[in-house]
Amino acid sequence: MGNFIFRERTVPMKEKIHPPYQEVLFIDSSTGTNFLIGSTLQPKEKAMFEGKEYPLVRVPISSASHPFFTKAGQFVDAEGRMDKFAKKYARKDAELKQAQEKQDAANKEKAKTPKKKK
């Protein structure tokens, strides 16, 4: 391993406690752009890039697809997170409407029944 300088003296790095540093292929899932970057990540998936096999990490958004960097007006979500969110809350909204309709029907039934006088 390497050494680093700490207060004007060289301190050796401890052996076998640091993860191995390697080149990892990152793929933007929304645009398909490839980035080859050094990292300590240890993904199980592998892919070929420029004739060599690299560990593969898929990222949902990167500088190649983020609207801030691309100057695009809208963000395209390739993994459907916005759709999942909309479906989840549409379902909850439908459940709330059903519950409210049941409550309204029960209140109408209750209002229809005449009250007994004592």
Image (cartoon, rainbow, N blue to C red):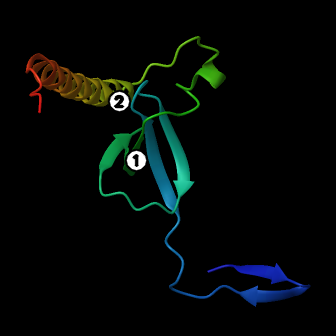
Q: Which mark is residue 85?
A: 2
- Describe residue 116's horizontal placement relative to residue 13 as left or right: left
- Describe residue 100's horizontal placement relative to residue 47 as left or right: left
Q: Residue at x 35, y 30 (%)?
A: 85
Single out the residue that lies furthest toward the top.
73
Single out the residue that lies furthest toward the front.
118
At label 2, which amino acid type do we have?
Phe
> What element does badge 2 sit on?
helix
Q: Is residue 20 above or below residue 30?
A: below
Mark 2 crowd level (few <14, some 14–19, many ≥20, 10 Å Cα) = few
Mark 1 crowd level (few <14, some 14–19, many ≥20, 10 Å Cα) = some
Q: Residue at x 10, y 16 (%)?
A: 112
Mark nearer the N terminus (2 vs 1): 1
Q: Is residue 62 above or below residue 8?
A: above
Nearer the observer, 85 or 115 = 115
**Where in the figure is residue 29, as x and y percent of width and height?**
39, 31
Q: Which mark is residue 57?
A: 1
Marks 2/1: CA distance? Answer: 24 Å
**Where in the figure is residue 98, as x and y percent of width and height?**
18, 24
Q: Residue at x 40, y 47 (%)?
A: 57
Q: Is residue 47 above or below residue 72?
A: below
**Where in the figure is residue 94, as x and y percent of width and height?**
23, 23
At label 1, which amino acid type do we have?
Val
Quadrant in the picture for residue 97:
top left
Q: Is residue 101 above or below residue 25?
A: above
